[in-house]
Amino acid sequence: MGVITYDMEIPSTISAAKMFKAFILDADTIIPKVLPHAITSVETLEGDGGAGTIKLTKFGEGSVHKFVKQRVDAIDKENFTYSYTIIEGDALTDVFESISYHIKIVPTPDGGSICKNRSIYTTKGDAQVSEEEIKTGKEKASGIFKKVEAYLLANPDA
C-alpha cells in the first residue's frame, strides 16, 4: 500500500465564510446545480452532516464513474475546515483503497479567500498512479471550486 499526497491552493474573490457555506455546507444542493452534467445528486445516507456522516454522490451520464460514497471525517464551521474520505465507489477503481480530502478556506487581507486542499490517495498493494492522473484530479477539483465561485458572483444573495 502506498500513499500519494498533493497540496493545492485556489484563490477566490469571495469571502472565506461565504465560500465555506457554499462549497462545503450547501455543496449537496449547489454543486449539482452548477455542474448538472457531472454530478446529478448528493444524498445523505447516515448522519446529520457532522463527523461520521455517510453521503452518496451520483455522477452524470458524461462521467466515467457512476457513484462514490464518502464519509465526513471532520467539520469545523468556525475555522472553515472540512475533511472527508471516499470509502466506496467505482472512482476508487482497482487502484485506490481510499482518497481523503482536507480542505481549509482561509480569509485573505483583501476580503477574498484561498481554498487550501490536501488530497491523500492510498493505493492498493503496489499500484502506481501517474502524474497525469494527479493533474487531472487537481484540474477537476479546481474546476468545481471555480464553478461555485462563479455561481456566487452571479447570485450574490445565495
Image: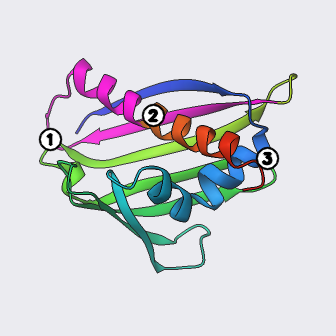
**Disc 1 + disc 3, Cβ < 8 Å:** no
- Name the residue type under label 1: Gly
What's the distance in space between the residues labelled 3 and 2, CA to CA?
Answer: 20 Å
Q: Secondary structure at mark 2?
A: helix
Tell me the quarter of the image containing the N terminus. Answer: top left
Q: Which residues are magenta?
A: 112-140
Residue at image location 60% in from the left, 45% down from the top: 151
Q: Which mark is residue 143?
A: 2
Q: Is residue 93 magenta?
A: no
**In the displayed structure, would residue 3 be above or below residue 71?**
above
According to the picture, the residue beneath numbered tag 3 turns out to be: 17
Q: State whether residue 40 is above or below residue 136.
A: below
- Which amino acid is tagged 3? Ala
Give coordinates of residue 96: x percent, y percent: 22, 45
The residue carrying mark 1 is 125
Q: Which residue is depicted at the point 18% across and 44% down?
A: 124
Q: Is residue 117 left or right of residue 3?
A: right
- Vertical comparison of 134 with 119: above or below: above
